Image (spheres, helix red, strand yellow):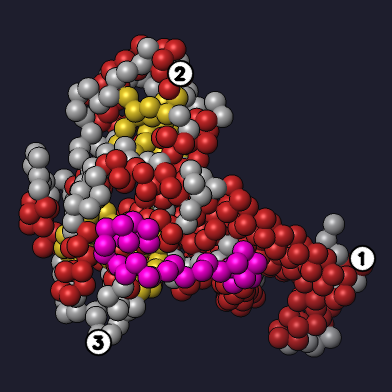
Amino acid sequence: MSGSVFAANEKIVIGSKMHGESYLLAEIMAQVLENSGYEIDRKFGFGGTLICYNALAEGEIDLYPEYTGTISEAIFTSDESVGENPNLKDYQAILDARNMKIFSPFGFNNSYAMAIKKTLADERGLKTISDLKDHSDLKVNFSHEFINRDDGWPSMKVAYNLEFAPTGIQHGLAYKAIDEGEIDLTDAFTTDGDIERYGLIILQDNLDFFPKYFGASLTRNDFPEDAMKILNQLVGRLDDDKMRLLNSEVVINQKTFSEVANAFLKSEGLIDTNTTVESQDGVLSKLIENTITHVKITIIALSIGCIVALVLAFLIFRSVKLSRSVIYFTGLLQTIPSIALLALMIPIFGIGEIPAITALFLYSLLPILRSAVTALTTIDPVLVNVSRAIGMTKFQQLRNVLFPLALPNILAGIKTATIICIGTATLAAFIGAGGLGEPIVTGLALNDTNLILQGAIPAACLAIIVEILFEILEKRIIPEHMRAN
């Protein structure tokens, strides 16, 4: 990207990944910049490292907290090596070619670690990761990113000669699962507040396997120098213990990210002590806002899907080969995992509602198209021949015979597509589109069941309402003998 994306007085967009510490660091950066007069747009909760990084590279966000180990292991290619014991200059030498800048190291190292219940570790005599070799019966779940990263499970099992067969789990949910005895061992971050909350201990990395993960700010080279100087006030302000304490304030004492960030910055003298955190919107107002966004995204995507799918169906249903090919192609789109499809949209459409609507539109095509083509091709040929015999044009046949007879199945396809869109739209929060997925994403980061339910229950209610509305619609416009069973 050439040139600067910043205009005079333009707001700075700060992002974060979906785990709690990333939210907190992003909020700290946001408040220290706001205190100096910058307007900040928060885009928190992106669903993974590469989604966040791609959003930064495409100019959709301007800054987010990242870790040195993650940059070298998940962002850099195999040809981009920082060597052993690298410093920020080593990272910057490679990032320069990517038009990126790393700066303002916070001072803590949040490395990967193996977490286990203290009671179970004492019972089994587990103190180091090497001790796990003799306990292959443990129930092990790791975060999806850890299972697939080169510096995660694939290399760790070789280094420590372990024989577990772990399955994936969302990072925040792993702590609850380990607390309830569903699993015994999971990957953790050394500064996680949940370690203390759930009475866990960290097994010693006796082979010094895990690289260092120093927290820092990642941005593009066009980031304003004045803003960079302000953020450099955070350099070295957070050691491991202090970061863990701030995280525990959120997960144990149930304080908001804003409150914890505000208290920390005041204690460090980085913002005015008279500065107060703006009151959070009430649950009801936030629920209404998220529901409106969710419904808007769904309706726009579904409307475009209906138009495209129905026009396609009426154009191709008379050709068996063509209709099979088109349905097969839309079926392939349906097999792409939703979060992957959303991530693929970022380089094309950026973040926010447009890529979410595009992804939902693609997912809506198959049920509508397939039901319409099936309905049109299974209409009794005698009726079609009669309509031809009385002199109807193809358009008149379509309007007066084919469409009315196919309508029950077409509505069934639209209903299915609507319910799919309502459910899939919750994932739009991973790319900053908002909606009912927003409280779910935040709840997963905090392991907060109440927040998760604030998104899950309304989404389920929307699906039920859609079912009822379609039932009413079918009764009003379709004769009883033609309704789908």
| Residue 17 placement (x, y as % from top left) | 37, 55
Counting residues from the N terminus, which is met first, the one under dot 3 or under dot 1? 3
Callout 1: helix, strand or loop?
Answer: helix
How far, Cα to Cα, is label 2 from label 3? 57 Å
Does 279 appear in magenta? Answer: yes
Residue lying at 22% horizontally and 59% vertically, measured from the top left:
234
Does 285 appear in magenta? Answer: yes
- Residue 124 found in image quarter: top left
Q: Residue at label 2?
A: 120
Q: Amino acid at mark 2?
A: Leu
Residue toward you, 269 or 257 = 269
**Number of dots carrying numbers:** 3
How far, Cα to Cα, is label 1 from label 2? 64 Å
How many residues crowd around disc 3 within 10 Å: few (fewer than 14), some, or many (20 or more)? Answer: few
How far, Cα to Cα, is label 3 from label 1? 66 Å
| Residue 46 placement (x, y as % from top left) | 40, 58
- Residue 186 found in image quarter: top left
Residue toward you, 141 or 24 = 24
Q: Residue at label 1?
A: 481
Q: Is residue 264 left or right of residue 174?
A: left
Residue lying at 50% horizontally and 63% vertically, measured from the top left:
428
Callout 2: helix, strand or loop?
Answer: helix
How many residues crowd around disc 2 within 10 Å: few (fewer than 14), some, or many (20 or more)? Answer: some
**Which region is colored magenta?**
261-289
Residue toward you, 290 or 252 = 252
Residue lying at 47% horizontally and 57% vertically, measured from the top left:
256
Q: Residue at label 3?
A: 8
Q: Amino acid at mark 1?
A: His
Counting residues from the N terminus, which is met first, the one under dot 2 or under dot 3? 3
